[in-house]
Image (cartoon, rainbow, N blue to C red):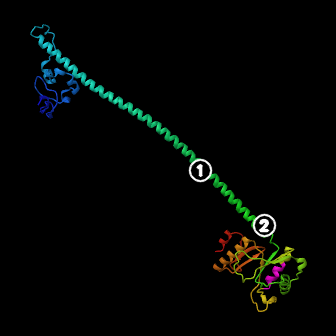
């Protein structure tokens, strides 16, 4: 086995070393790092490896010249030559160290250059990401603005629909201002409604002239009325509103009119007369009656097409003109 491969202990750190420089003077072996020489620098010595000496031996052999040592003899020339070789070797070793450091610096510079490239790429990607995010935020803001505009438009449309609905309900009630709705009168084929109306007027002692007082009289089907046995209400339209109000007041004065009172023999069903209400007011009347019954109110009635309720004779009147007004019945 070549000597360089025989395991030995480093003369500096005493750790085991296989391949390393061998001092030609003290015959000791070193780690490259402990010897202060790189492996590449040592290999470049070639045949000079056989004369390589460690720094300890070199310090012992090489002594700086003094002012007194100015005479050289022929016997000292070989020693001077050896000293120069050692100095050259030491310089070579120092250059190897410098080269190693330069290699390290070059490697660092390459790493820095690569890092700069990575940073530039990162900055570019970051700029693109920021730009894309900015576009997305702008798009979202535009959509939010559109949604707000749509919400505003929807609210305006709702208000418009509510206003139109209210106007329609008001108009619907207005055209019925001179109408009376009479419920409970038995219905027969070929009946004479004018005759029935005259009998009602006679019963409550009301002076009625159908030819001049009545615009028209008819029966109508109520919405969602599925009871075919229940007679359809009679609608009477008066020529003058005051005449309608007077007739309605006369009918209400005769409390508890029965069908038998106006000629329907054996029929004791009650007859009711009221203002001809619009769809909205008819709904409010139905809801008011239900709540009045649940809350033990004493009165629920209609006057001048307006629904009114009252807890008792001493309590204030509550006017039911909207669905929100129903909440007042507590």
Pointer 2 or 1: first along the chain? 1
- Label 1 secondary element: helix
Q: Quadrant of residue 11?
A: top left
Magenta residue check for 247: yes
Residue 54: in sight, yes or no?
Answer: yes
Report the residue at 14% width, 20% height from top: 51
Q: Which mark is residue 171?
A: 2
Report the residue at 21% width, 22% height from top: 44
Q: From the viewer's perspective, is 310 left or right of 207?
A: left
Per the picture, the main secondary structure of the magenta-coloured stretch is: helix
**Residue 49: percent from left, percent from top:** 16, 22
Q: Which residue in the structure is indicated by mark 1?
A: 144
**Taking 225 as reference, is 133 above or below it?**
above
**Residue 104: percent from left, percent from top:** 30, 28
Seen from this angle, which residue lies furthest bottom? Answer: 266
Q: Quadrant of the C terminus?
A: bottom right
**Residue 278: percent from left, percent from top:** 75, 71
Q: From the viewer's perspective, is 270 left or right of 239?
A: left
Q: Quadrant of residue 29?
A: top left
Report the residue at 10% width, 8% height from top: 74
**Residue 110: percent from left, percent from top:** 35, 30
State which region is magenta.
246-254
């Amino acid at each position: 086995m070549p000597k360089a491969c025989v395991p030995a202990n480093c003369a500096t750190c005493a750790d085991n070393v296989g391949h390393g420089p061998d001092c030609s003077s003290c015959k000791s072996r070193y780690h490259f790092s402990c010897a202060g020489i790189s492996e590449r620098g040592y290999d470049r010595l070639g045949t000079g490896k056989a004369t390589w000496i460690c720094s300890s031996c070199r310090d012992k052999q090489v002594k700086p010249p003094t002012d007194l040592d100015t005479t050289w003899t022929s016997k000292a020339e070989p020693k001077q030559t050896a000293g120069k070789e050692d100095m050259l070797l030491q310089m070579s070793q120092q250059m190897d160290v410098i080269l190693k450091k330069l290699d390290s610096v070059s490697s660092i510079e390459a790493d820095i250059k690569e890092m700069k490239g990575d940073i530039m790429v990162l900055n570019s990607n970051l700029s693109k990401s920021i730009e894309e995010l900015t576009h997305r935020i702008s798009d979202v803001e535009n959509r939010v603005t559109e949604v707000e505009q749509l919400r505003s438009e929807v609210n305006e449309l709702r208000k418009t629909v509510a206003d139109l609905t209210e106007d329609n309900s008001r108009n619907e009630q207005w055209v019925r201002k001179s109408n009376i709705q009479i419920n409970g009168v038995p219905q027969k084929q070929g009946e004479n409604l004018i005759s029935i109306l005259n009998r009602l007027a006679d019963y409550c002692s009301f002076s009625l002239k159908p030819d001049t007082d009545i615009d028209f009289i008819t029966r109508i089907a109520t919405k969602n009325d599925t009871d075919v046995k229940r007679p359809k209400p009679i609608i009477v339209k008066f020529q003058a509103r005051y005449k309608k109000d007077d007739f309605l007041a006369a009918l209400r004065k005769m409390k508890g009119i029965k069908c038998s009172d106006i000629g329907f023999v054996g029929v004791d069903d009650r007859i009711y007369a009221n203002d001809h209400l619009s769809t909205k007011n008819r709904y409010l009347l139905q809801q008011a009656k239900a709540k009045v019954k649940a809350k033990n109110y004493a009165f629920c009635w209609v006057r001048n097409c307006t629904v009114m309720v009252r807890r008792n004779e001493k309590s204030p009147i509550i006017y039911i003109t909207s669905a929100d007004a129903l909440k007042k019945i507590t």
